[in-house]
Amino acid sequence: MQCELNEIVVSWLPDAISMIATTGQLSLVSGGTDDQRSRLLKLFMGFEPLSSGFVCVDGEPLTPDNASELRRLMAFAPRHLPVIGETDPCYPPSVQDIFSLHANHNRPVSNGLLAETMRSLTPSHDTSEQLQWLAVALLLGRPVLLADHPPRETAASLAAIARQGTAVIVASDDQAFADAADNITMLNSEKSFIR
């Protein structure tokens, strides 16, 4: 699986941005602001308008006609959910799964399975909602995981999950993710590099 942003131009970044995230690698989006990094993840899902450039998933350009289908390949762990009562069309259906604590419509997530997955992500006893959303996103078992500013303690675990065959894309400025990343895309005029 490969997700690509190719020469994307958007109003909220000063320069065009390109990046490729592939199965087996943890790709980090760093630099810029928290909001810019979060919005970049939404580009992969087709929820942010482009001035130019294109988004591809496994070589297939993301279009309004196929966006919903391609989003089914992705699990999104948000930084935060909208306030109850608000609607935000940029959140993909998997966020609704996370909010209702269902891995999908056919397999509810039990508290035991959720707790076990959370423990596998971090040795701490963190029970934050953000860690819960990340655990549920993992339980979806999709080939692409988009993690919006996950807890720093999950960096090594997310790198291991990538090595097991998932394309993991993390938006964060935390050094723990930079240390664990296979490639890093810097926002705001800084070039991406691969280690």
Image (cartoon, rainbow, N blue to C red):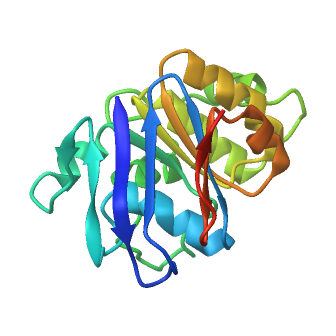
Residue 141: % across, % down:
44, 26
Direction from residue 73 to residue 27 in the image, left or right? right
Compared with 28, 82 (above or below) is: below
Percent coordinates x, y for residue 94 in the rendering: 40, 48
- Measured as percent of width and height from the top left, residue 135 is found at 62, 35
Quarter containing the C terminus: top right
Q: Quadrant of residue 163?
A: top right
Between 174 and 138, the one lying in front of the other is 174
Q: Can residue 37 be seen in this view?
A: yes
Q: Give the residue drawn at x 9%, y 57%.
A: 65
Q: In this view, does 117 lie to the left or right of 169?
A: right
Residue extending farthest right: 124
Q: Residue furthest left?
A: 65
Q: Position of residue 159 (x, y in %)?
A: 67, 27
Q: Which residue is drawn at 30% across and 74% down?
A: 50
Picture layout, residue 114 above or below residue 177 = above
Residue 102 visible in the current orientation: no
- In the image, what residue occupies the spot 75% across and 42% down? 177
Towards the viewer: 129 or 92: 92
Query: Camera-side residue: 115 or 192?
Result: 192
> Is 66 situated left or right of 145 in this image?
left
Which residue is located at x 66 percent, y 43 percent?
132
Query: Quadrant location of the N terminus?
Result: top left
